[in-house]
Amino acid sequence: MQDSTEPARPSAVLSHGGRVLPAVTVDTYNEELRDEDGFVGDRASGRAFRAILEDWRDKLRAQGEDPFGDMPTREISKSKLDKVLAEGDPLAAGLVHTAVEEFAVELATVVRRFLRLKDWHGTERIVIGGGLSASHIGELAMGRAAVLLAGENISVELKTISNHPDKAGLIGAVQLAPSWVLAGHDAILAADIGGTNIRVGIVDLKMKKKGDVSKAAVWKLLHWRHRDDEPTRDEALTRMAEMAGELIGLAAAEKLKLAPFVGIGCPGLIDERGVIVTGGQNLPGNWEGEGFDLAHELTHRLPRLEGHEPVVVIHNDAVVQGLSEVPNMTDVERWGVLTVGTGLGNARFTNRPDERGKDS
């Protein structure tokens, strides 16, 4: 997590894992709450939901009535679960509803624990992102958790992330760059590196006036489920660079002027040098520690952009996904994000009034 005792000063240069960004201060991120059973966040992860569903399937199997038959729980897609809720037989729908209800209780518990943290005090709204949020079962779990929290007089709004999580993890990268970096350009290159997938995309800035990136949107996106291929770290980096190169070519063909800036979201705690201090254990190969410089490794694999060597800026993936919500948070001051994916990502922000658009 970030050290909240440090004064909040905007950096004079582009830095990794920045605490003071053009539009917000990152109060804390990558909090690793623990209890006697381990990491609290693990109770509200995608894996936790699957474990709950599997547990209830076991109970039905004991009675000889598993509506999903022999299909492994890990292979039951979110879309299939959504369809069961809408159209399935009563037993199958009841099974999914029961799993959602139990997961919602865990999600409410996790939210409650985060709100007890000093750096999360005063949080007015929490955005729920990550892969599970892009499904009806995820929305239902969030809604049920919100009801449970309201029943305890806990005043916080839960809201599903506005953009699809696959795109939000790229769109948020525009908030890592001060306006002087973006000025005179049409788009940026961004990447979202996860424990299962890597996504690289072109984000169209859609700026109508200086510094206004509120309409930024993904123009093109390439996706690689690297977990299926089990690549080495070097192979993963090479593939990322190839994806980026393909997108750069497409942008050039459309005469999109790319800023010499690449925003990267990845798991873990990121220090000012771009070192993944902790939390990179699910990435392909060893990405943690002093011996690996992700920014350097990517920079020397990428072509020049607009005649310049690109500047790569790295931040935590939950932070970047949360930053995609900056345009939707003008009515609150303090807000957070929880990303329900392979694990549970987290970040808390405080808006910096009227900062975006100034030369940060």
Image (tube, rainbow, N blue to C red):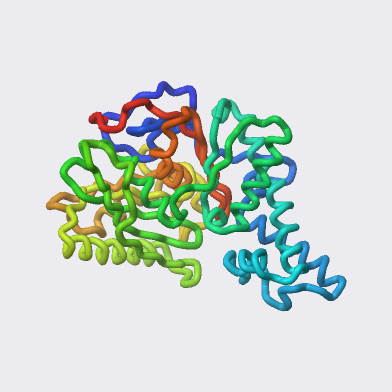
Q: Position of residue 329 (x, y in %)?
A: 44, 35
- Left or right: 87 as drawn, with respect to 182: right
Along the horizontal axis of the image, is 43 left or right of 251?
A: right
The residue under the point 45% across, 30% down is 331
Residue ID at (28%, 38%): 212
Quadrant in the picture for the C terminus? top left
Residue sitting nearer the eye, 73 or 151: 151
> Does residue 90 appear in the picture of this structure?
yes
Residue 305 x/y as whole percent: 18, 53
Looking at the image, the residue that sits furthest to the front is 87
Which residue: 56% across, 59% down? 135
Residue 274 falls in image quadrant:
top left
Q: Is residue 293 visible?
A: no
Identify which residue, 111 or 289, lies in the foreground: 111
Pinpoint residue 216: horizontal percent, then vertical percent: 32, 48
Q: Position of residue 72 (x, y in %)?
A: 67, 73
Above or below, comparing residue 51 to residue 44 in the picture: below
User: Image quarter for residue 112?
Assistant: top right
- Of 168 and 243, nearer the camera is 168
Tell me where residue 8 sits by quadrant: top left
How many marks on residues?
0
Q: Residue at x 56, y 38 (%)?
A: 31
Most extreme residue toward the bottom is: 70
